[in-house]
Amino acid sequence: MKYRDIQTGVLPGGYSTASSSIEASKCITRRDFIAAATLAASSHALFGQNSSNRLAHDRHRPQYHLMPPANWMNDPNGPLYWKGRYHMFYQYAGVISNSATKYWGHAVSTDMVHWKNLGIALAPTPGGPDKDGCWTGSAVVYNGVPTIVYTGATWSQESERAARAAGFVPERQMVAVAADPNDLDLLKWNKVPQDPVLAAPPEGIKAVGWRDPCVWREGADWYMTIGCGELGKGGMALLYTSKNLRSWKYLHPLAVARPNPNAHGPAMAFRSMWECPDFFILQGQPILLVAAGNSYLTGSYSNHFFHRKNEGRIDFGTAAYAQKTMEDDQGRRIWWAWLHEKRSMKAQVEAGWAGVMSLPKHLTLRSDGMLGMNPVDELRVLRRRARNVAPQKIDASSPLLLKGISGDCVEIKAEIDPSDAKQCGLRVRSTADGSEHTLIGYDRETQMLFSDTTHSSKDPETATPSRIFANRGVTQGALKLGTEPLRLRVFVDASVLETFANGRASLSDRVYPLSPASLGIGLFAEGGSAQLRSMTVWDLAPISDNRLTSGAELFRV
């Protein structure tokens, strides 16, 4: 998909809400992104030895997260486990712009940790039903052949924006198959002659968008849900069925949003859209994911209708979007998301890269019927030198930073008893004087897990734009601990922070310290004292020796 309705829920002062309602979510509209994308008009594709060397030494570029060698990445597409390998496809553009023509980039791994970029898997066909972009979709195995179902983009007007303004729906649903199923890298894909397999939304639905297919099998039949929405009615996931993935029959909406009284008028059109719906059964529980707020719905599934009961959020971070899951060979449900940048478009263009794939999360069903999430066990292979921190009291008199412990390529595991502290947690990416730092912690009074990046950088390019999202500020989400201690696992990877708490909350964020010395790690407590029970910091091994900048020639478009 090209532009996204990214939830921010930004409040005055840079605070982000923890609203549990996907209908009530405040969203960045696709038109906001279009406006922001115009700043990237001078961006150009970066290839060649000099650009690769520059990117390989960019201290903000992560070292153990997946990304293309250069340029733009957004949504995870069609994650697939096939013959011992994990395949990850993703939205790729040859320029730094969310409005650029999208391709499917492709990477492969044997462990979901160490990745090799393979180049372009799908490209728009000139004059075809996807001539203006290969947008988001899914991958399944049909009759022993890996098969991609995705949204193609096409319009005759000068832009997608103009096409929609004229009442034209630019999305088409497409199918491509692996040219050689025995090729472990699945390098070549062929589009089927039946494309587009669906040319328009169902009659009677005035769709503001119609994209991001999710496909699954029930017995001998295949089912597909496509994200959609109607102005004034809200988002919906439309349900189709097929015997062969080529000929599809529309059934009815799988699920529909609850009425949103604010979803009126042209400016609200894409806030009525459910992007990236993802439907699956986890330990007997039907789950429906919706992109806004990284939300999920639990409920019942009967007669091919999903009846929602409860809802939650998998990742509270405003940096994460376009969530997508897969089932691996062990039957685990693995979650991925796009981690977008939180600095100016100017800074992204100058850097020559934008967008990172999240670490894989393992989703489980908790005893209360809600989702649990943890980093996959495979990530432990990255651990190198371990440093243990002795149990200690944490209060206002505690040292700002821990002695001899620092880094921007680390994993931190800590258990903290909040005791009577109002807030407590970890300080990361900090200068010695604390002039730049990020706080990851827990607010005992509000019962919120939070990330506070207010002072993460002195770089003016990270200041909050007036029209988009809060690049720096407090992002938070509900975490009721009761008598439990706070159990944190925090992954720090240059500009990426991924936090997991107590097996049932996570929060992703981005930071860009101006000082190269912003590497300190410490503890903090405010409004009282807390007790550190245990803490270990591991240096993590990079997954390549050049920040995944090899293979740029495979991405020439």
Image: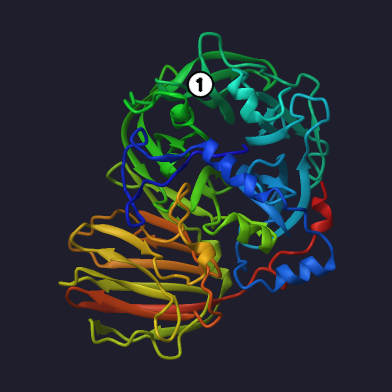
Q: Is residue 450 left or right of residue 231?
A: left
Q: Secondary structure at mark 1?
A: strand
Q: Quadrant of residue 339?
A: bottom right
Amino acid type, callout 1: Leu
Of all residues shown, which one is farthest toward the top? Answer: 204
Of 11 and 329, nearer the camera is 11
- Residue pictured at 56% horizontal, 18% vertical: 240
Q: Is residue 212 left or right of residue 386?
A: right
- Residue pictured at 66% horizontal, 31% vertical: 150
The picture places residue 369, in percent across and down from the top left corner, at 31, 41
The picture places residue 293, in percent across and down from the top left corner, at 41, 43
Q: How is the image coloured?
A: rainbow
Quadrant location of the N terminus?
top right
Q: How many marks?
A: 1
Regarding residue 412, the answer to whether it shows in the image is: yes
Of 512 and 324, nearer the camera is 512
Characterize the local packing of mark 1: few (<14), some (14-19) or many (20 or more) Cα atoms within 10 angstroms. many
The picture places residue 410, in percent across and down from the top left corner, at 51, 74
Of all residues shown, which one is farthest toward the bottom? Answer: 403
The residue carrying mark 1 is 238
Regarding residue 332, the answer to whether it shows in the image is: no
Rendered position, 201 above or below 261: above
Rendered position, 98 above or below 227: below
- Residue pictured at 55% horizontal, 62% vertical: 378
Of 380 and 169, nearer the camera is 169
- Residue pictured at 71% horizontal, 68% vertical: 55
The picture places residue 398, in percent across and down from the top left corner, at 27, 86
Of 64 and 460, nearer the camera is 460
Q: Is residue 261 left or right of residue 499?
A: left
Q: Quadrant of residue 290?
A: top left
